[in-house]
């Protein structure tokens, strides 16, 4: 017990001793004379700490010692609260003083002050969030003398825990930073055991026992809004952490006198006015709520270090007084907010900053935030009036920023016509990993974006750039020379309406031997409405050179929304030894795709909306690794499609291919083939015998091929591995469902069946009775059907039954047949007006047939139980 109390309390005591001495030494003038008392408090706390250490040697079985230790812990917590209140008043005084002084102090003197500061089951855990919670609880401290910040100390602690294998499954971002990790459920349970008595996870099954909960400091409430706990005031007053929804917090807000950390997710629309009375609060995280406004008292949280408003889409604005929170170090928001940052010189995280005309919202104020790191999005850049203003943002000196977004509004309230000059002054530090430029209306990109190749070698102003996005730069007529960026892995170019030709400008001038885009892994070109030609990069780079290599590491290539593109050449694909995914979409004039011979690594090929294509790429058969082929809305693609040679092909999807009259040939050579999906192909009139040879087929869809008249009755006979099958509708004059005679041969593994009917069908296929392994069945668009057959009762494994859009369906099978469906858990009836009326709960004529089913939904309303949707039909 002593070890546990000491482990949990000792950090608070050490912090309290340090702060008491610091406050006494600083002699901060608040018209109070507390120097003597503060020094005495520091001595008392140090004595408590020594007593606790001595108590480790006492007998664990001594009940008196345990009670005494707990009492000492309570005294220590209360002492920390007293010091916190003193610190609160100090910060409040500073905020008001700075606010008044700010009316008279010049920008240069403020900047010098800032520069002076600069010298000085598994549980997923977000690393930064965890460290900020440690800071809020006083577990992490910095050192002004050594310029070590709290976050840096937190990183050291995190790395120690990581090296001790307490964390696992590390997730890294694109730039090499740890984003999150997992704590194994056994480790999590151990931490709860160690902190037992101070930590409680509450759910609907818990009851608060005042006597046993009197030591609780950290509370997590798991509730969907129903059965909210009644938390005793004596417990609420001692809490240091509360994780809950808005409603739980509102019910107890006025009692939370000692709260340090507050995380709210979901719940009500309003936060209480008493929020500002949480003097000790250092961490406030609000996410996925319907909160619309934040009370004005928010601006009185002077101890607040971290403020998060994430996915709060109803939130209109943050309080104007946020500028008073001079202790803030991290501000997160899902979208730009008008925040006055003039006094927030301790900020290390500012996820969004919207430039404006209000005090504290000018671009120059970013220059005062010398410690910014991580991600920063600057929006409304049209409000930057001049190059001089832009230069004061001082982005080049922000060495710890790794992701930067520069955004101009699409519909500008003001237009200074100075985009080129402003962007030229926004040169970031060379450490930057990711850059997005969105809505830029200059004609030329800045000089710092162009590779500088000189006689002494190569120097790259953006030499560490990993990701670059150029979006909605409508006035630019060309792409900057980017080919020599050594670390660039992702390039996204979109909606540059005036670019007509690409290729030659992607490589720099003056290079004698070139590896173009040596690290690029993903290239996307999207929405280039006037792009007509993509020229040979290698040819333009160095004519006649033998050692030129382009895109040697490219893995994914997407070209989309280029309706005028006719010519495309990237030197063939012979040098693209790693290309695994190729997608070409909505390039209606593209007549051919460069030869894909030799693309032995290609695994996924998608062609969509390419009406100029008459055939598949030449050499496709040599793509021995191709696993997935999707062709959609290619109206002129002829029916002579060959799959010969594609031995690794696992899935073929054909959508809205008007020229398709029969299945592709050579499918029998695809020995790994598992999934075939054909939809909305109006001219498909027959299914070739090849399909019978696809013995490994597990998933089959043939939908909305309304001219399909004949299907061999034995075509399913050899498909003994089918797990999911979707069929129909077919030719509207057919009066019975074709091709199901031999379905009983493949019934052993079939688990999911969807049948689409048409008006001429008056009955369901009688072969359904053989599918005793079937678990999911959906019947849709059988408008000629009036009653379901008795044979449905033979589907003994059926778990889920859905009936959609059967306008004349009136009768279910008999009550005896329905009762034989002993595994049926879910029934859904949708757009069946007659059946809806007859299945009305307790009064409909068919209700007795279905009343035993646990979960029933009729016309999107839960009639019984709670219907859980099944998202894995196909």
Image (cartoon, helix red, strand yellow):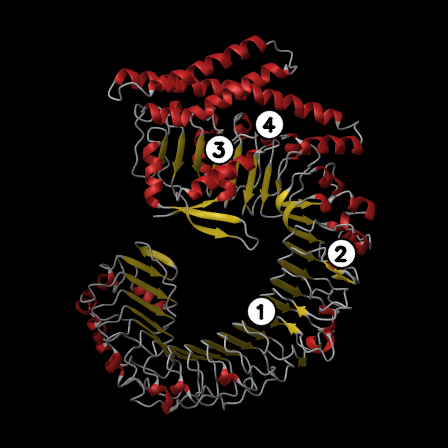
Q: Earlier in the sequence, mark 2 or mark 4?
A: 4
Tell me if label 2 and label 1 are in contact, CB under 8 Å.
no
Distance from label 4 to label 3 (Cα)? 16 Å
Q: Earlier in the sequence, mark 4 or mark 1?
A: 4
Which numbered dot is residue 554? 1
Distance from label 3 to label 1 (Cα)? 45 Å
Find disc 3 in the rendering and name its residue: 261
The kind of secondary structure element at disc 2 is helix
Find disc 4 in the rendering and name its residue: 300
When the figure is inspected, residue 477 is found, relative to residue 277, above or below; the finding is below
Find disc 2 in the rendering and name its residue: 448
Q: Position of residue 532 (x, y in %)?
A: 71, 77
Distance from label 2 to label 1 (Cα)? 25 Å
Q: Earlier in the sequence, mark 4 or mark 3?
A: 3
Question: Label 1 neighbourhood size at 10 Å, few (<14), some (14-19), many (20+)?
Answer: many
Question: Label 4 neighbourhood size at 10 Å, few (<14), some (14-19), many (20+)?
Answer: many
Q: Earlier in the sequence, mark 3 or mark 2?
A: 3
The kind of secondary structure element at disc 3 is strand
Question: Label 3 neighbourhood size at 10 Å, few (<14), some (14-19), many (20+)?
Answer: many
């Amino acid at each position: 017990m002593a070890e546990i109390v000491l482990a949990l309390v000792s950090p608070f005591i050490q912090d309290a001793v340090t702060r008491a001495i610091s406050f006494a030494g600083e002699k901060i003038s608040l018209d109070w004379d507390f120097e003597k008392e503060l020094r005495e408090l520091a001595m008392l706390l140090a004595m408590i700490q020594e007593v606790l250490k001595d108590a480790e040697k006492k007998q664990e079985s001594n009940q008196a010692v345990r009670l005494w230790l707990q009492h000492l812990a309570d005294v220590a917590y209360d002492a920390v609260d007293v010091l916190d209140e003193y610190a609160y008043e100090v910060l409040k005084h500073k905020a008001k003083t700075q606010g008044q002084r700010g009316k008279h102090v010049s920008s240069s003197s403020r900047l010098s002050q800032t520069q002076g500061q600069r010298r000085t089951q598994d549980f997923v855990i977000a690393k930064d969030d965890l460290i900020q919670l440690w800071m809020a609880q006083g577990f992490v401290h910095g050192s002004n003398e050594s310029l070590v910040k709290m976050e840096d100390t937190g990183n050291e602690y995190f790395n120690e825990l990581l090296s001790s294998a307490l964390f696992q499954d590390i997730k890294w971002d694109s730039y090499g930073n740890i984003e999150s990790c997992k704590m194994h459920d056994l480790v999590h349970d151990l931490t709860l055991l160690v902190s037992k008595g101070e930590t409680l996870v509450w759910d609907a099954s818990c009851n608060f026992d005042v006597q046993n909960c009197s030591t609780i400091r950290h509370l997590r409430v798991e509730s969907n809004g129903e059965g909210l706990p009644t938390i005793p005031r004596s417990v609420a007053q001692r809490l240091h952490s509360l994780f809950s929804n808005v409603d739980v917090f509102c019910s107890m807000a006025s009692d939370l006198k000692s709260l340090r950390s507050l995380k709210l997710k979901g719940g009500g629309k309003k936060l209480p006015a008493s929020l500002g009375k949480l003097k000790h609060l250092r961490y406030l995280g609000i996410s996925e709520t319907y909160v619309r406004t934040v009370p004005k008292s928010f601006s009185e949280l002077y101890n607040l270090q971290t403020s998060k408003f994430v996915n709060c889409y109803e939130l209109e604005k943050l309080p104007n007084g946020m500028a008073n929170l001079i202790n803030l170090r991290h501000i997160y928001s899902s979208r730009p907010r008008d925040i006055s940052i003039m006094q927030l010189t301790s900020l290390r995280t500012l996820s969004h900053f919207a430039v404006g005309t209000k005090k504290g919202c000018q671009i120059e104020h970013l220059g005062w935030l010398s410690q910014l790191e991580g991600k920063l999005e600057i929006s409304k850049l049209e409000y930057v009036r001049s190059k001089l203003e832009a230069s004061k943002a001082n982005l080049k000196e922000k060495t710890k920023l790794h992701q930067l977004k520069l955004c101009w509004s699409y519909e500008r309230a003001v237009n200074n016509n100075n985009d080129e000059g402003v962007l030229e002054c926004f040169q970031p530090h060379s450490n930057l990993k990711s850059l997005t430029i969105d809505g830029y209306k200059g004609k030329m990109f800045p000089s710092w974006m162009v590779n500088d190749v000189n006689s002494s070698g190569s120097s790259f102003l953006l030499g560490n750039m990993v990701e670059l996005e150029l979006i909605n730069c409508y006035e630019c007529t060309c792409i900057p020379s980017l080919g020599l960026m050594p670390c660039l892995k992702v390039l996204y170019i979109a909606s540059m309406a005036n670019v007509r030709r690409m290729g030659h400008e992607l490589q720099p001038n003056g290079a004698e031997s070139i590896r173009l885009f040596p690290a690029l892994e993903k290239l996307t070109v999207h929405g280039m409405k006037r792009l007509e030609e993509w020229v040979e990069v290698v040819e333009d780079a160095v004519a006649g050179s033998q050692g030129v290599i382009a895109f040697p590491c490219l893995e994914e290539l997407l070209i989309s929304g280029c309706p005028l593109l006719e010519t495309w050449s990237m030197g063939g694909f012979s040098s693209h030894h790693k290309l695994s995914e190729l997608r070409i979409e909505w390039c209606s004039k593209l007549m051919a795709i460069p030869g894909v011979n030799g693309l032995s690594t290609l695994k996924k090929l998608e062609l969509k909306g390419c009406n100029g294509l008459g055939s598949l790429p030449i050499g496709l058969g040599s793509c021995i690794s191709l696993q997935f082929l999707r062709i959609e809305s290619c109206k002129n693609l002829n029916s002579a499609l060959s799959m010969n040679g594609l031995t690794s092909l696992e899935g073929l999807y054909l959508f809205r291919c008007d020229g398709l009259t029969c299945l592709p040939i050579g499918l029998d050579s695809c020995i790994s083939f598992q999934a075939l999906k054909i939809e909305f192909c109006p001219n498909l009139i027959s299914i070739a015998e090849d399909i019978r040879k696809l013995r490994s087929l597990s998933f089959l869809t043939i939908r909305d091929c309304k001219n399909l008249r004949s299907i061999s009755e034995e075509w399913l006979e050899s498909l003994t591995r089918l797990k999911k099958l979707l069929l129909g509708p077919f030719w509207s004059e057919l009066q019975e469902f074709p091709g199901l005679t031999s379905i009983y041969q493949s019934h052993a593994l079939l688990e999911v069946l969807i049948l689409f009917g048409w008006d001429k069908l008056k009955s369901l296929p009688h072969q359904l009775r053989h599918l005793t392994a079937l678990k999911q069945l959906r019947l849709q668009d059988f408008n000629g059907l009036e009653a379901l057959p008795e044979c449905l009762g033979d589907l003994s494994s059926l778990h889920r039954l859905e009936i959609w859009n059967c306008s004349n369906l009136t009768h279910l099978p008999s009550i005896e047949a329905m009762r034989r469906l002993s595994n049926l858990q879910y029934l859904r009836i949708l757009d069946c007006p007659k059946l809806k009326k007859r299945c009305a709960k307790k009064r409909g004529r068919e209700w007795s047939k279905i009343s035993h089913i646990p979960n029933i939904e009729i016309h999107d309303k839960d009639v019984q139980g709670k219907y859980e949707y099944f998202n894995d039909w196909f």
